[in-house]
Image (cartoon, helix red, strand yellow):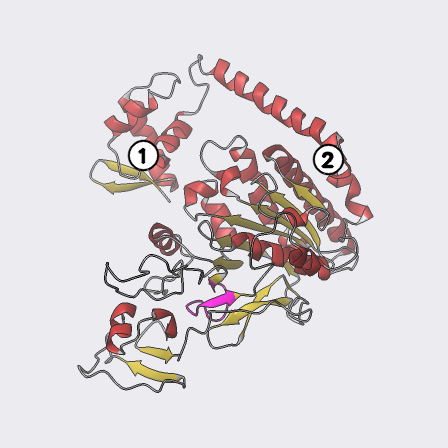
Amino acid sequence: MTLTPAAPVLPHDQIVELMVEVPPGQVIQYNLGALASAFQIDDPGRIAVETDGSRRALVTIYPSNPLATMPPPSDEDMLMDAYGRIVVGRYHNGRPARRRLFDPRTGSAVRALTFGTTGAGKSRTVQYILACEKRNRIVSWYADLKGGQSAPEARGQVDWHATSQEETILMLRSAVAVAQSRQARYAAMGRNAFVIGDPDPLLSVRIDEANRALEKGAPYREEATYLIKELGRTGRSVGVGMELDAQASHLEELGGSDTLRAMLKEGEVTLLRWSSSMMRQLVADGLLPAGTQLMPIPKSLKPRLLRSQFAPGADDDDDACDTQGTAYLLSGPHPASMMRHFRIGSIMPMPGLDPEILALYGPGDPAKLEDASLEAAGGQYEARGTDAMAVLCQAVKDEATKQAAQVQAAKGGRGAQLLEDRIRTVLAASDDPMTPDEITTLVNADGGAEVKVGSVRNRLGLLADGGDVVRAGRGLYEINR
């Protein structure tokens, strides 16, 4: 894109739209800072750029930042339309930004991912979706792995509100059992898709702060990853949806599972304010097409102004123009268009539960699981919200402690842990390719049976042939991410 040296004069009270293109054989690229400088614009938030991924771009320049303020949602925004969508906010051009809760055309429950750094508005976004689910009579199972602090207003507004690692595991076990039970019932009925309320309600299982359950070192990481993958395989066609809300997108922080990521990224993906490393990972994992450029979401909408260090009041400005709720709906029709979620809740922090958020949920009790699935959901479902849950959670802890002791005892015997698994663990923990000698050293440092480099080489060959490991160069290996 070539700009003339003389900056064009823009009207102060009108929206300007420019269609630009590069010659055939070239791919359009742009620098947002350079664009803002060329048009003498101090606030880059006034500029929106959309490309077709090839030669053309549409540049829209606003007289002021169009996402600076957002209204709260209306009752109509919160109700699903004929396509199973709700309105979650507005794009920069004022058009409604929609997110799907269900796909009635295919009878498929939704899989979803929501990413965002601390303070980006993830918790408010989750609260809004939960409130919409309640209003649409969707059964919500919500695990808040911040001890219940992320969305305290959700207690009593969802069918199941878990706040610990152990209860989250019990919730996932129940969800998988319900999906499998529905699968058997639907097969007997001769149906291969889901219809809301005929005979069962849609069930949505959501894990907030999911990286706490799925990152390395998490106490139940292996089982949680397995259960989420199993739910992804069986739940979609029987009305059991799955969402993960997390602060990062790196594969290793989401169970280290390519299968899990592949299933979830096909669904609804929302990207709130991110870090540069997260953006690189999104492209690497296929959540964004190569070459896609997203305008970074700043922490503040307030333009930076150069002032003399000695000017009166230079340090007195109160920067309250935050960008909480600003995002990209990567799975929507305009993945490169910035949008902002509705204002959810009170502007200032509340000393207790936020009355505006509670009002979003509306009156009445939340939808509950159908009677036909109660047996599958098990005793943990009946125990939710009661003192009996603490006993069940302690049983999960005791079970994990017993298994850990058995594994530790077995490490003294040769072959207690498969060499292939030990090699995968070593490679997954490294950001750089390694030689067989380096891998052998680290494998022998894991406390298991000692192995020779020849055995490691043989296993590396098998793992590379199977696709788990990649040959990164002559004599170098890395995990297939």
Identify the residue at image location x=38%, y=40%: 468
Horizontal and vertical percent for residue 322?
45, 60
Q: Which mark is residue 380?
A: 2
**Neighbour class for label 2 at 10 Å: few (<14), some, many (≥20)?**
some
Identify the residue at image location x=44%, y=13%: 413
Instruction: Answer with left or right where residue 433 lies relative to residue 334.
Output: left
Identify the residue at image location x=33%, y=60%: 313
**Amino acid marked by disc 2:** Gln
Q: Which mark is residue 461?
A: 1
**Amino acid marked by disc 1:** Gly
Q: Is residue 193 at all visible to an observer of this figure?
A: no
In the image, which residues are magenta?
327-340
Q: Nearer the viewer, residue 352 or 480?
A: 352
Pick the quarter of the image with the N terminus: bottom left
Based on the picture, tell me whether residue 96 belongs to the magenta stretch: no
Q: Is disc 2 placed on a helix, strand or loop?
A: helix
Q: Is disc 1 placed on a helix, strand or loop?
A: helix
Identify the residue at image location x=69%, y=46%: 155
Identity of the residue furthest to the front in this view: 312
Of tags 2 and 1, the one toward the viewer is: 2
